[in-house]
Structures are given as C-alpha cells and as structure tokens.
Image (cartoon, helix red, strand yellow):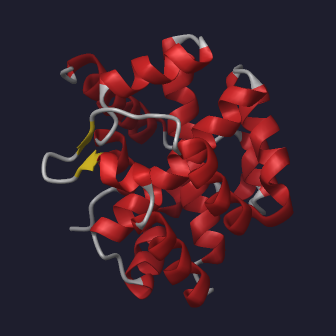
Amino acid sequence: MIPNLQIELRRFISSNVVSKLNKFYFENDALLIKAIDASIGTILIGVYNKIHEVSLYNELVEIVGATEFYKEIDFESGRLLSVDDCYKEEGNKLLKRIFDNKKSRITEMVSNEIGIKSETAREVLNFSALLVFSYFNYKKQVQDDLQSTLEEQKRGVLNSIPFGIKIILGFSSHEVVEEKSKTKFSNSIFNHIFSNSGS
C-alpha cells in the first residue's frame, strides 16, 4: 500500500518545531499548523505539475541533499526536532523553480486564506518545500514512482489546500470532490500528532 504523502510529511514536524517557528513569527499555533498543512499540500501539487520535467526534479532533489535543513532531520526516528532559519534562503531556491512566476501570488493566497502574515506565509512555504524534497531525497523517490503516487493521491491533496491556490495551480473547483469523512480523519490525525508529539 502506498503511504499517504501528506500524513508521512506531517509526522516529521515535532511540537518543538512549531513552537520555534512561532517564536520567529508570533502567529496563533492553530493557524500556523493550518498554514504548514496547506503549504505541504501546495508543494505536492506544485511537484505534480512539474513532475514530467525529470531533469528539474532530479536537480531539486540533489540541491536539497546539500542543504543544512536536510542535515537537521533525524530520518531514523522520522522527526524534525529543531529548526534554524537556514530554510529562509534554501527553500526559496526550490520555490522559484517549482512555481515560476506564481510564487508571490501563492504566498499571498496562503496569507489571505489562512489568516497569517505575508512574511509567515513566505517562510512556511520555504520550510515546506525543503521538508517535501528532503523526504523525496531520503526515500530515494524515483520520478516515475512519485508521478504515479501523486496522481493517485491528487484529490486528497487538493482537498487540503485553499480554493484560491487550486485555481492558481490550474485546478478548477469541479476537479475536487469534497470527502468530508476523509478530511475529518486527516485533520484528526494531524491534531493527534501535534497534541502527542514529544519535546
């Protein structure tokens, strides 16, 4: 069975990381968690839109493997226990390649639809891009296999991101079927992870 990418990625984020990010940005914890969740989904859809560009995918995976952020993840325990501000610069390189000239619009949409500051939205997207590609690097995720996985999980991912971002990324509301029970299940898992994650 193919693991749910979003759930796998959420598991890496400890409560310590959320607390430290909040020391940088002074946001409501619940909104910050919601922004991270939406940003992970946004990055996955951005990757889905670019996955046919094999050379670009391989280049981005290689770039993230050399970052400080990648070295901070304890892959054996599946946790990112701490974070410094290296992601601000390192993540931006990835976002520019994934979203081209849509990056600023996506940032503002995350800010507006989640209800956080623009600066927070920008840095949470940087953080999420590094987390997603670090995971792909560690798992040695081959482009063909990833393309198949994203195709299979696309609907669920789209349901996790704000409507305006879906439109920017080229998806209409008709392409997304709201699956309330699945959405509630996903949210309960995410809340459970944060409420029970250790320091």
Residue placed most toward the observer, 44 or 71: 71
Instruction: Please state the horizontal and vertical placement of residue 22, each as a whole percent of the image.
Output: 51, 17
Look at the picture and state if 114 lies above or below 26.
Answer: below
Identity of the residue drawn at 73% across and 42% down: 163
Instruction: Please state the horizontal and vertical placement of residue 85, each as a whole percent of the image.
Output: 52, 35
Instruction: Work out whether residue 191 can be spotted.
Output: no
Displayed quadrant of residue 66? bottom left
Identity of the residue drawn at 37% across and 55% down: 70
Marker count (numbered)? 0
Instruction: Please state the horizontal and vertical placement of residue 186, each as a whole percent of the image.
Output: 37, 37
Instruction: Please state the horizontal and vertical placement of residue 172, each as a whole percent of the image.
Output: 77, 57
Q: Is residue 159 left or right of residue 144?
A: right
Look at the picture and state if 140 lies above or below 176.
Answer: below
The quadrant of the rendering that contains the N terminus is: bottom left
Identity of the residue drawn at 69% across and 21% down: 116
Q: Is residue 171 left or right of residue 193?
A: right
Q: Is residue 6 left or right of residue 176?
A: left
Residue placed most toward the observer, 60 or 153: 60
Residue farthest left in this picture = 76
